[in-house]
Amino acid sequence: MAVELYMKSGDGYRVATPSKICEAASAHLFKKITKERPKLGPPKEAADFLKQQAGIDHEQFGMVYLDNRSRVVEVQILFNGTVDAAMVHTREVVRAALDFNAKSVIIFHNHPSGGCEPSVEDVRLTKHLQKALAIFEIELMDHLLFAGVKCVSFMERGAL
C-alpha cells in the first residue's frame, strides 16, 4: 500500500516529494538558525553547536558561515563522502562562503571510524582552504574534526 504525504502550498495542498520535504526542512532550519543567530566563540562552543556530527556513518564536510560579529548565518553540509573519505572542492567552498556573504567560516568534518587524529590530508586541506578563503578576506576560524563523541579543534592544536 502506497502512502502519499501532502504539503500545504500557496493555493492548496500538493503531493510532497522527498525533495520538497527536504527543501521545507532546510527552510525551517534556516529560519530557526537565523532567528536565534547564536554567536560562536571558543572551539568548545562551536563543537557543542555542531555535535550532531557524531554518529554519522559516512564522511561529511560542512561549513558554518559567520557574519562580521561571529554570529551564525547558516550551517551547511557541502560534501557527502564514503566511510573513509569525502571529496572537497576548494572552488565550491569559496563560492559557498561568498554566497552567504560570510566574514569568517568554521569548517567541519567527521571520521566515522572513530579515529580522532587529523590525517596528513586533513591538515593539507585545511591550510589550502585557509589560503584560498584569505584571498577573498574570509577568515577560516577553525576546522573541527568529529569522531564519535570526541572533537578536535585545529585552532587549539595550532594547525591554523
Image (cartoon, helix red, strand yellow):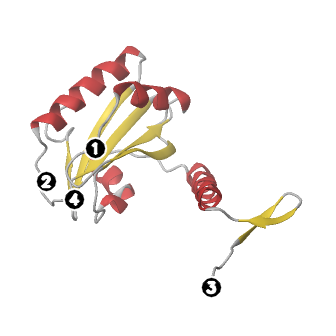
Mark 2 vs mark 1, CA separation in Å: 16 Å
Mark 1 vs mark 4, CA separation in Å: 11 Å
Q: Callout 3 environment at 10 Å: few (<14), some (14 to 19), or many (20+)?
A: few
Type of amino acid under label 1 = Ala
Type of amino acid under label 3 = Met
Mark 4 vs mark 2, CA separation in Å: 10 Å
Per the image, the residue denoted by label 4 is 112
Secondary element at tag 4:
loop
Tell me if label 4 and label 2 are in contact, CB under 8 Å: no
| Left or right for 77, reference 1 | left
Numbered label attached to residue 1 = 3
> Given the current orientation, which residue lies at the most extreme bottom position?
1
Per the image, the residue denoted by label 1 is 86
Q: Is residue 29 above or below residue 105?
A: below
In the rendered image, which quarter is residue 155 located in? Answer: top left
Residue drawn at x 31%, y 48% is: 81
Residue drawn at x 22%, y 31% is: 125
Q: Is residue 141 above or below residue 133?
A: below
Type of amino acid under label 4 = Pro
Secondary element at tag 1:
loop
Q: Callout 2 environment at 10 Å: few (<14), some (14 to 19), or many (20+)?
A: some
Mark 2 vs mark 3, CA separation in Å: 45 Å
Q: Is residue 141 above or below residue 17?
A: above
